[in-house]
Amino acid sequence: DWSGAVERQSFDVRRAWTEEHGDDLNYGKESQLRFLRRGIIGDWQNHVWGEAYAVAMKEWRPLMEEIGYD
């Protein structure tokens, strides 16, 4: 069941969760917060390109479209 999946993974929800629970994670809060980057729409394009982009789109595009990502 995918209902609520996108909302549960929103930047604000993930950032708040990490702020609260990040020290319990293997890599610690600071590392986890860096992973979240800036929360800007489309910012992933500044970090993922070339073959990594092609592989991600091949493997994940159908699921991403199904749950509402463009």
Image (cartoon, helix red, strand yellow):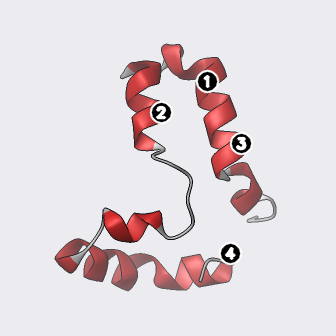
SS for callout 2: helix
Instruction: Answer with mark 4 or mark 3, whichever residue precedes in sequence.
Output: 3
Q: What is the C-alpha distance between the residues marked 3 and 2?
A: 12 Å
From the image, tell me which residue sits under label 3: 13
Mark 1 in CB contact with mark 2 (< 8 angstroms): yes
The x and y percentages for residue 9 are 65, 52
Q: What is the C-alpha distance between the residues marked 3 and 1?
A: 10 Å
Q: What is the C-alpha distance between the residues marked 4 and 1?
A: 26 Å
From the image, tell me which residue sits under label 1: 19
Instruction: Answer with mark 3 or mark 1, whichever residue precedes in sequence.
Output: 3
SS for callout 4: loop
* Residue neighbourhood size for the residue with mark 3, other residues' Cα within 10 Å, grouped as few (<14), some (14–19), many (≥20): few
* Residue neighbourhood size for the residue with mark 4, other residues' Cα within 10 Å, grouped as few (<14), some (14–19), many (≥20): few
Residue depicted at x 69% and y 44% = 12
Relative to 32, 14 lies left or right: right
Relative to 49, 43 lies left or right: right
From the image, tell me which residue sits under label 4: 67
Instruction: Answer with mark 4 or mark 1, whichever residue precedes in sequence.
Output: 1
| Relative depth, front residue between 6 and 50 | 50
The x and y percentages for residue 45 are 37, 71
| Relative depth, front residue between 69 and 26 | 69
From the image, tell me which residue sits under label 2: 33
Q: What is the C-alpha distance between the residues marked 1 and 2?
A: 8 Å
The kind of residue on which mark 4 rests is Ile
Mark 3 in CB contact with mark 2 (< 8 angstroms): no
